[in-house]
Image: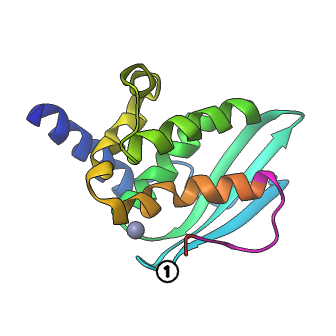
Amino acid sequence: MADLRELYQEIILEHCKQPRNYRALPAANHKAEGYNPLCGDHYTVYLNVEGDTIRDVSFEGSGCAISKASASMMTQALKGKSCAEADAIFERFHKLVTGQAESNGTQALGKLAAFSGVSEFPVRVKCATLAWHTLQAALKDQQEPVSTE
Ligand code: ZN
């Protein structure tokens, strides 16, 4: 278990250092902003949705390692998925970071399982889910920035 934990930590640090899809998206047809005032995390999530498919997704902004790595891995996990699949993945991810995951649900999350340790630090749940809430707001074309408070 300790080995797995170290591996998870490595994945998170690696994504924090080299976030994937970290750019504005000129072709975006949805975007939203999200804040986590408790930690100072602040991101914009860009989406290009065609029909019901997330063709492209990217993000910009700054924040702690957990929030940035979560946003980075989210963009990787959701590219090419349908909006319904994105909702289902978020639901599973949310259960994972709040400590309510079923073991088969965690397996289906792939690399996102790296965030399982977050469930031991409730204040970090907001960091880990900020980009996901922001993505949902973008899909709904919500004008108001998302705030975790
Ligand atoms: Zn944070």
- Residue furthest toward the front? 100
Percent position of residue 61, x then y: 54, 70
Percent position of residue 146, x then y: 66, 69
Does ligand 1 reach within 8 Å of label 1's beta carbon?
no
* Residue at figure coordinates x 40%, y 33% from the top left: 101
Is 145 part of what is drawn in magenta? yes
In the picture, which quadrant includes the C terminus? bottom right
Query: Is 21 on the left-hand or right-hand side of 109?
Result: right
In the picture, which quadrant includes the N terminus? top left
Task: Decide: is 62 above or below 125.
Answer: below
Q: Ligand 1 sits in which quadrant?
A: bottom left
Task: Decide: is 122 above or below 56.
Answer: below
Circle 1 residue: 37
Magenta-colored span? 139-147
* Residue at figure coordinates x 62%, y 69% from the top left: 34
What type of secondary structure mainly makes up the magenta span? loop
Is 7 part of what is drawn in magenta? no
Rendering quarter of residue 125: bottom left
Percent position of residue 47, x then y: 74, 50
The answer, for residue 61, to whether it is visible in the render is yes
Percent position of residue 58, x then y: 63, 52
The answer, for residue 79, to whether it is visible in the render is no
Residue closer to the observer: 30 or 28: 30
Query: Is 123 on the left-hand or right-hand side of 92?
Result: left
Amino acid at pointer 1: Pro
* Residue at figure coordinates x 71%, y 42% from the top left: 56
